[in-house]
Amino acid sequence: MIREVLRMGDPRLWEKSSPVGRFDSQELNELIRDMRDTMAHLNGAGLAAPQIGVGLRVVIFGVQSNPRYPGIEEVPDTVLINPDIQPLADELEEGWEGCLSVPGMRGWVPRFRKITYSGQDERGQHFERTVEGFHARVVQHEVDHLDGVLYPMRIRDFTRFGFNEALFPGQELPPED
């Protein structure tokens, strides 16, 4: 089922999410199915449970061949529950981000270039990946939602934040998360 995505300003987006304790349950499976349906409907790269009003530490993400993301490396479809992120260096990389909860806007956001993330899948199985670039950016963006952080809160230079049509008049938009 496609769910409404909360928009920046809704107080539920500022809350810290609770860990998932029960896996492979009907409720969790329905949540993940609804998140997938919603993300696909909106052509997103990722979605966090708080964005649809559910305060649980669940994110999904994935980018395959998609006209909205020309030239971006593929990111495997992933369900990440109770995530932990460890930067592998202090090196930050800045890039354009957008968000389904901040529609029509983009901002230039610093993120760790290379990270290891770990967590559980929908069955509670632990996994870990080391990633960099766009994949690392998407994970950090989505996990921020679980701690009540939206990407505008990370922007350093507000001359590089605004409405898409003002920032990129007549141009193809950069990818958004």
Image (cartoon, grey):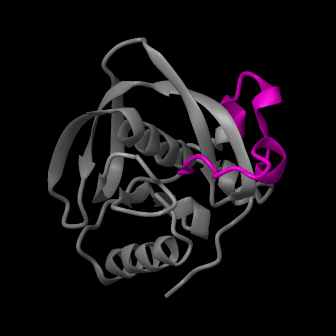
Quadrant housing residue 55: bottom right
Residue 110 sits above or below residue 168 on the image: above
In the image, taking residue 130 as reference, residue 138 lies left or right, namely right
Residue 92 position in % (x across, y down): 48, 18
Residue 48 position in % (x across, y down): 50, 58
In the image, taking residue 7 as reference, residue 176 lies left or right, namely left
- Image point 81% across, 55% down: which residue? 9
Residue 136 sits above or below residue 98 on the image: above
Residue 102 position in % (x across, y down): 72, 55
Residue 164 position in % (x across, y down): 76, 50
Quadrant housing residue 8: bottom right
The single residue placed furthest to the front in the displayed view is: 170
The single residue placed furthest to the top in the displayed view is: 90
- Image point 67% across, 59% down: which residue? 101
Q: Which residues are magenta?
A: 152-177
- Residue nearest the viewer, comparing 160 with 53: 160
